[in-house]
Image (tube, grey):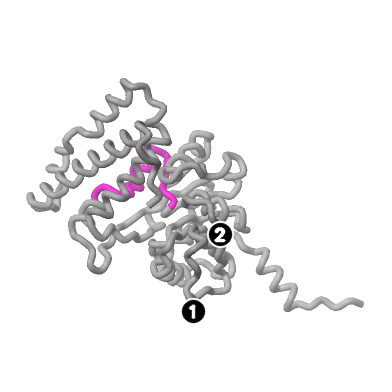
């Protein structure tokens, strides 16, 4: 009679019991990634039922010495530039029937995985979770104020537009099998493009109010300018470049309308409202100039 080595059997059983894969692209953010992984190590979700797949998107940025890597964490490298190429590589390595996405500078709440998976198990195909900003040490108040009011409006993204960012997204693996992977040609906006593609194909999406992820605001206004240039490149390649001249003009005028509704915001002083008004309008001009430069072929889309 052949005896079963139950230790090996139980180990293999656990290896095949991964029901959730967390995919995290990173680009020269090892210190921030460590904080993200620390938060993921404290999840209330059973640790032996999920894996974490980190994809380093800069082959020249090596893993620091003594970087803590727990048993359920795997690190791969994707040389093709762009976070969507990195996420696609992560997908190809993932074992879970559910996929969760976040970013390396994010800090998931301890119940993040439980709350997101609970909605998928109710029958939804995608879940876009809540985002909340915090001001990093030494961060600028103006940048924090701006991002708190205007960035990552996940409730509107999900409930109105049927889209979500990948900083807080849960997906059934079968959805990718049906609609394909992220568009690797995009440097920005690929999360909106993919989730819209999925919901347009009939897949349901829920807003995860309790599936919370914390995100640091940009440290200063220049960082917001850099972000605007990057996202403007995503907008350009997603739809703006295919617009007719008349539609380009009308879209540009709409974007550049004075954001006077800011003065209706509650809980802000008049000086804060003025600061937000100027910041919002300045950034819209930055985005329009970026798209015009791309249209005229004077530059290519920014990566960072």
Residue 51 numbered mark, or none: none
Q: Is residue 151 magenta?
A: yes
Residue at the spot x=14%, y=38% of the render? 260
Q: Secondary structure at mark 1?
A: loop
Quadrant of the rendered structure where residue 74 is? bottom right
Identity of the residue furthest to the left in this view:
270
- The image shows residue 161 at horizontal and vertical percentages of 38, 38
Q: Who comes first in sequence, dot 2 or dot 1?
A: 2
Q: Considering the image in quadrants, where does the N terminus appear?
A: bottom right
Residue 271 in the figure: left or right of residue 42: left
Please identify, in this view, whether the residue under mark 2 or under mark 1 is nearer the observer. Answer: 1
Bounds of the magenta segment: 149-166
Pointer 1 residue: 66
Identity of the residue furthest to the front in this view:
298
* Cα separation between marks 2 and 1: 24 Å
- The image shows residue 109 at horizontal and vertical percentages of 39, 64
Residue at the spot x=18%, y=38% of the render? 259
Q: Secondary structure at mark 2?
A: strand
Q: Is residue 289 visible?
A: yes
Pointer 2 residue: 21
């Amino acid at each position: 009679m052949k005896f079963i080595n139950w230790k090996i059997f139980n180990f293999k059983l656990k290896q095949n019991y991964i029901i959730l894969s967390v995919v995290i692209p990173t680009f020269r953010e090892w210190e921030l990634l460590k904080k993200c992984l620390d938060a993921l190590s404290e999840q209330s979700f059973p640790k032996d039922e999920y894996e974490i797949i980190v994809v380093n998107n800069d082959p020249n940025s090596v893993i620091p010495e003594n970087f803590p890597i727990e048993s359920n964490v795997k690190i791969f490298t994707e040389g093709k530039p762009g976070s969507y190429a990195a996420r696609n590589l992560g997908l190809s390595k993932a074992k879970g029937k559910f996929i969760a996405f976040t970013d390396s500078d994010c800090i998931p709440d301890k119940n993040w995985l439980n709350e997101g998976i609970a909605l998928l198990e109710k029958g939804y195909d995608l879940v876009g979770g809540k985002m909340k900003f915090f001001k990093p040490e030494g961060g600028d108040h103006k940048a924090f104020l701006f991002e708190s009011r205007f960035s990552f409006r996940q409730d509107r993204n999900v409930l109105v537009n049927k889209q979500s960012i990948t900083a807080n997204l849960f997906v059934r693996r079968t959805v990718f099998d049906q609609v394909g992977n992220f568009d690797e040609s995009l440097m920005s906006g690929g999360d909106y493009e993919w989730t819209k593609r999925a919901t347009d194909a009939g897949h349901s999406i829920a807003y995860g109010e309790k599936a919370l992820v914390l995100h640091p605001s940009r440290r200063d206004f220049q960082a917001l300018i850099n972000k605007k240039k990057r996202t403007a490149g995503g907008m350009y390649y997603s739809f703006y470049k295919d617009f007719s001249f008349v539609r380009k003009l009308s879209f540009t005028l709409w974007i550049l309308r004075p954001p006077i509704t800011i003065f209706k915001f509650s809980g802000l002083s008049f000086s804060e409202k003025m600061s937000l008004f100027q910041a919002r309008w300045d950034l819209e001009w930055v985005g329009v100039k970026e798209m015009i430069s791309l249209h005229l072929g004077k530059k290519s889309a920014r990566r960072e």
